[in-house]
Amino acid sequence: MRYEEQSAPEEWRPFVTRMWFLEAPRERRYEKILPLPFAHAIVNLSSPYRLIDPRGNASVVDEAFVSGIQSEFLLIENPTLIRHVGVEFTPDGLRAFSATPPSDVAGRILSASDVFGDIAGLIARVRAEPAPDAALPALESFLRAARRPDIGADRLVSTILAAMQKHPDARIGDLAAHAGVSHKTVITHFRAACGIAPKHFAEVLRFHRFIVGLPLGDDLPSWADLAAVSPYYDQPHVIRAFRRFSGYTPAEYLRRVAEFGPDAASFVPLEDVPGPPG
């Protein structure tokens, strides 16, 4: 496995979390990607990924693609060798590099050309030199050219996002009142900046932080262990959250993830995919 990560330039910190290069054999043929509270873009340097819909139908993903903030899990078929370069945006960061409304991207996987325009040059550069010391600077150069200088951070959204990070179970109305604005104003600003309603985003953030913080070791966590790190009120709430966002019960999820370790918390390897519903 080869993984190299590069921090965003200082002036991009409100919009970009990190850039990375990854080369590794796949763990399993398929992967269930649980909801992530951020958008990201990837230039694939290997064989194509395929996206599997809920009925089991597969579609090829473009070699450069953008995944918006997802509120449901995705099923993908990985190439035998995973090799790509990518960028992770803050929840409201994509709009600093693309005129495509975040609401058009949220919940979808789009061709990067539909989001950023002409991306052929970047694809050609990273495919010509598919190594981190060339691919990461090429990606940074592309983003620097795409940066929209007239777009800055929305201070209200930044305030709400910071409050959510500290208190992911807080009511949106309470956050709005604390910020001195109406609930409706928060919803309007948040949708424009992130492409998703603040309540739905908070639910995704809460679950994501829960699973990446699970104590996954040699022994599976007990219900007491889960309760100790859970942001949910009781056992039924935990079960509903797992079923909604992962399609598993907590026990099923833990059994699957324990084999592969913490890195599989949001990216669950699968040997096969579930059959169509019904």
Image (cartoon, helix red, strand yellow):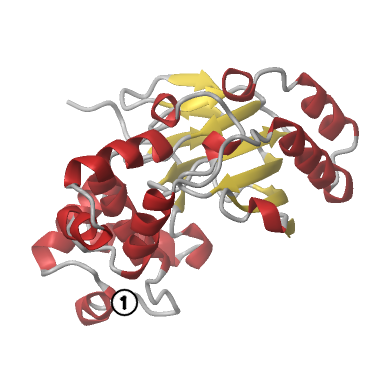
- Is residue 210 among what the camera can see? yes
Q: Position of residue 18 (x, y in %)?
A: 64, 54
Q: How many marks?
A: 1
- Is residue 72 among what the camera can see? no
Q: Residue at x 33, y 64 (%)?
A: 163
- What secondary structure is found at the residue carrying circle 1? loop
Q: Classify 252 as above or below 193.
A: below
Q: Classify 190 as above or below 125.
A: below
Looking at numbered disc 1 in the image, what kind of residue is underneath it? Answer: Pro
Q: Residue at x 73, y 33 (%)?
A: 46
Q: Is residue 38 left or right of residue 198?
A: right
- In the image shown, does 194 or 125 lie closer to the viewer? 194
Q: Position of residue 69 (x, y in %)?
A: 42, 40
| Number of other residues with Cα within 10 Å of mark 1, as a class: few under 14, some 14 to 19, many 20 or more | some
Q: Classify 234 as above or below 41.
A: below
Q: Residue at x 77, y 43 (%)?
A: 140
Q: Position of residue 165 (x, y in %)?
A: 37, 64
Q: Is residue 228 left or right of residue 73?
A: left
Picture quadrant of residue 276: top left
Q: Residue at x 47, y 44 (%)?
A: 92
* Residue behind mark 1: 221
Q: Classify 53 as above or below 73.
A: above
Q: Position of residue 112 (x, y in %)?
A: 61, 25
Quadrant into which the N terminus falls: bottom right
- In the image shown, does 61 or 14 lie closer to the viewer? 14
Picture quadrant of residue 81: top right
- In the image shown, does 183 or 133 lie closer to the viewer? 183
Picture quadrant of residue 277: top left
Quadrant into which the C terminus falls: top left
